[in-house]
Amino acid sequence: MVSAFAAALYNLRFENPGPPALTAMKLTPMLEQYFEIKRQAPDAILFYRMGDFYEMFFEDAETVAPLLDLVLTARGKGSENEAPMCGVPHHSAEQHVAKLVRNGYRVAICEQVGEAPAGKGLATREIVRIITPGTAVESYLLEREGCYLLAVAPGSELLGAAYLDVSTGDFFVTRYVGSGDPRLMDDLVRFAPREIIHPQGTDAKALVARRGEVASRELEESHFDPSGAFDLLTRHFRTQSLRGFGLEKGDPRIAAAGAALRYAQTSHKRDLDHIADLRIDDDADYLILDASTLENLEIFDARDGGRASALWSILDETSTAMGTRMLRRWVSRPLRDRDAIFARHDAVDELTRTPLLLQEICTALGRIGDLERLASRINIGSAMPRELLSLDSSLGSVEEAGRALEAAQGPLLAGLRARLDPLGDVRDAVREAIVPEPPANLREGGAIRAGVDSELDSLREIARDSKSILLRIELEEREKTGIPSLKVRFNSVFGYYIEISKANLAKVPDRYIRKQTLVNAERYITPELKELEEKIVGAEEKSLAIELRIYEELLARLGESCQKILATARAVGEVDSIASLATLARRRRYVRAKIIDTQEIEIEQGRHPVIETLTERFIPNDSSIRRDDNGIQLITGPNMGGKSTYLRQVALIVLMNQVGSFVPASKATLGIFDRIFTRVGASDNLARGESTFMVEMHETANILHNASPSSLIVLDEVGRGTATFDGLSLAWAIIEYLHDVPERNAITLFATHYHELTDLAKTRERVANYNVSVREWNDQIIFLRKVIPGAADKSYGIQVAKLAGIPKQVIGRAREILETLERKERDMVEETRRPGTSVPRAQMSLFDRREDEVARRIRAMEPEAMSPLEALNVLAELQSILKGNEHG
C-alpha cells in the first residue's frame, strides 16, 4: 500500500499542485530522479535500471506484480517514505516486457547512460525506448505477420487514417466516412493493427469499442495538428510538399500520418529514416473483401478461432517472413487488373512446370532471414552483432536465389531477379568488422575483428597478456612464500587480490596488505598487483568503448544501404509468394484458370481448398454460372448436404484466381470480379447490442447497396433469423431486387430452405434452381453432395435430426405432426382445384392465398339466392380480403 506521504508526493508531481506544505517535503535523491523520469512517460510502466535489475515503484509496481507473478515489496519499508516496489533481472527482462506489451501496456526502458558526477551521487539515467504494441521492432515481440500502428484523425467531413509498421517501414494512408464506415471495420480485420491512437474527445472512440481487443491511446489534440503534421512529414521525407504522395494541405490523412510518425519517433527516441515512402491505399485496384467476407469464408481464421482450418493455413507455403507478409497482403487484397493476374499466373505456371528450379529457389529462400526487420533494427541502432551475421548470410542466399532465377523465362520472374540485389558492399562491411562467432550482447566485448583498429588490438593484447602475467605472479608468490595453496583472484569489489588460507597465515610476508578477512582465509593486495589491475581494467574499459564506437559507425554505414536492403527484401517476398503458390499448385493438383472479360464462372470438378484436406473423400462439383443467363442460382437441399461448402467453394476459387493462384479444379474459366459479398451463418453481436437477425440485415443491406454487375454474392439462408413468413418475404424480395435492378445485377448464389422461392425461376429469367442431391433408403438419407439442376422436393429435416441423435420419441412425434400438416396441405390443394381439370397445383404459393380464399368462396356461392344488397356486402368483403384487411 502506498504511504500517505508517497501518495501525496505522487499527486504533487503528476496530477495536482497540492498544498504548499507538500513542496517542502524531501525525497531521497534516487526517488527524486525516479519521479523526474516517470513524469516523461506517466502512462507507461517505467523499468528503472538499478544495477542488475529493472525496478518498478508505486502504482507501476502494484499493477505489474500480480500480472508478472512478482513479489511486491517496498523500499524504505516501515518509514514514512515507504515506496512499493518490485523488480526483474535485466537478463530476463525481455519475457516480462513482452507479457506487458501483449496485454496492451506501454513500457518505458530507463537505462544508466552515464556515471555519477565526480564519482559521487546518482548515475545519469534516461528513457532510451518506450515499447508499445504498435511500434515494436524487437524480435521477441514480433511474429512473421505485420505489426501496424493505426492513427485516426477526424476531419470536417472524412476520417483520415494512417497505418505504420515500424518494423518493416510500411506506411500508407486512407480515409473513411466517419468511424461508422464499414470499410474501417474491413481494414481493422485486414491489417489487424496492434495499437490505435486518436485525439481526445472525438467520435474515434467508437472504433475502439468496435475493436476492443486492440490497445488504444487517447492523445492530446496537438499530436494531430494538421500544420505540425505537414511540417513533420515534409521534414522527414525531405520534400517541400506532399503532392508527390497524392496529398494536399487540409487532407485529414496528413494529420493521421503525422501523428503516427511522431508517436513512433517518440517511442524510439530517434528519427526513423528507414520509413522512406508514404502511399495511398486505393480500393479501386483490388477485389474488395469486407470484414464479413473475410470471416464468413474463413480466410485467415476459422469460426472456431483456430487457423488450422482456415484458407490461410493452406495457402501459406512461404519460406521467409517477408514472403508470409507479402502473400497475406495478396490474399487480403486480390487483384482486379487482368494483366497483373495473368503475370502472376505465368510465373506460378513456370515454376510449377520446372520442379527442380522451384526446389532450388525454395532452398535458397529458406536460408534468408527477415531482411525487412533487420534493416529496420540497423537503422534504429538496435541490431546486435549476430543479427549482422544473419544479414550477411541472408544476402548470400539472396545471391543464390538470383542465380537460380537466371533460368526463368517469364517477365515477372525475370524482373524480380533483377531486383534481388545481394549488396556485396554490405556483406563485405559486415565480414570485415564482425568476428565469426560474436557474443550475444555487444557489451560483453569481443565482437569486432582483429585488425579493424590498431588501438583496440593493442589494448586487447594487454588484457590477453595480463592473464599470463597473473599466472606468473601466482607461481612466483607461491615460490617466494612457500604457500602452495596461494591463489590470485579477482572480484568487482576489491579487484585483484591474493587469497591465503588460515593455516598458512604465519608465512605471509610483511609486504602484503590485508584487505579482507574470511572464515577460512585472508585476502591481501600488493602494489604490483594494484598496478597490474589498473592496466588490465583500464584496457578492458577502453577496449569496450572502442568496440562500441566502431559498431555504431558500422551501423551508420549499413544504414546508408537501408533502402536497398528493404527493396531486396520486398523482391524476396514476391519471389517467395510466387514459389509458395507454385508449391501449393503442385502439391494439391491445382490448375490454371482461363481468364475472360465477361462475368462467368465455369468450373469442372471444383473442390473446397480446405475441406478436401480434412476429409479422405471429397466430392467435387461442377459450376456453370453466366450472369446474363443463370446468374442467380437458388440452391435447395437438406442440412449437412453440402450447400454451404459449395457456396464457399465457388467464392474461394474466384478469390484464389485473383490472388494469382491456381485453383482446386480440373478446369476453370473465370471472369474478373470487383467484390465478393457473403452473408453466411448466424451470430449475435452482443457488444453492439445486435441480434442475429439485425446482424444479418446489416450485412444484407450492405450487399444490396454496394453490389455491382461485376460482383459475386453468396447468400446462405438469408431470412431465417425471423418468423417464417417475414423471412420468406424478405428472401423473395431480395432475389427480385438483385434480378430486377440493373446496378445490382450480380452473379448470386442463394442457398435456402424456403422451397417457395423456387417459384421465382418461373417469372425471373436469370433465376435458376439447383439442389444438393440425396438418396433415400430404408427411411435413411444418403448425402451424395452433388449439386444438380432442379429444385429439391423436400427438406429431410426429420431424417437429419435422427442422424444427429435426437431421441426416438421426439422423432416419432415429429413424423406425426408432419403427416398432419402435409394432409392439411393436400386438403387445401384439393379444395383449390380449378373447374374442368383434375390436376391440382403442385405447391401452394404463400403469395396467392388470399386469391385462393376468394376463389374458394366464390365457387361456394349461390348468386341466384342472394339479394342485391347481400351480393354487394359479399363483394365488399371479398375485396377487403384481397386488400389484406379482412376483419371477419
Image: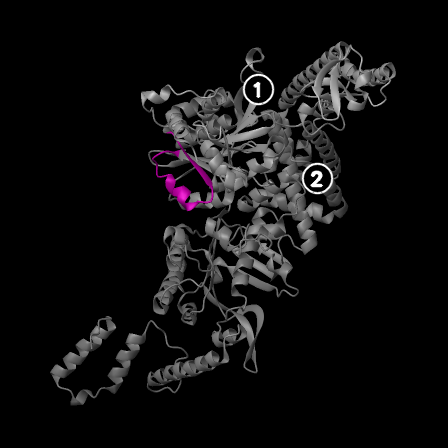
Residue 738 relative to residue 273: left or right: left
Relative image position of residue 523 (x, y in whole percent): 74, 19
Q: Amino acid at mark 1?
A: Val
Q: Earlier in the sequence, mark 1 or mark 2?
A: 1
C-alpha separation, residue under disc 1 versus residue under disc 2: 40 Å
Mark number, residue 365: 2
* Mark 2 crowdedness (10 Å alpha carbons): few <14, some 14-19, many ≥20: many
Q: Is residue 281 visible?
A: no
Q: Quadrant of residue 3?
A: top left
Can residue 275 be found in the magenta stretch? no
Along the line of sight, the residue nearer the viewer: 847 or 35: 35
The range drawn in magenta is 199-220
Relative image position of residue 624 (x, y in whole percent): 55, 62
Q: What's the residue at 45%, 66% (across, down)? A: 752
Relative image position of residue 630 (x, y in whole percent): 48, 63
Is 461 above or below relative to 748? above
Can residue 202 be found in the magenta stretch? yes
For the residues carrying marks 1 and 2, which lies nearer the camera in this image? 1
Residue with the mark numbered 1: 113
Is 458 above or below relative to 707? above
Which corner quadrant holds the C terminus? bottom left
Residue lying farthest bottom?
Answer: 865
Q: Amino acid at mark 2?
A: Leu
Residue 516 relative to residue 373: left or right: right
- State how the image is colored: one colour
Is 117 above or below relative to 859? above
Q: Is residue 447 visible?
A: yes
Secondary element under disc 1, as helix, strand or loop, is: strand
Is 568 above or below relative to 113? below
Secondary element under disc 2, as helix, strand or loop, is: helix
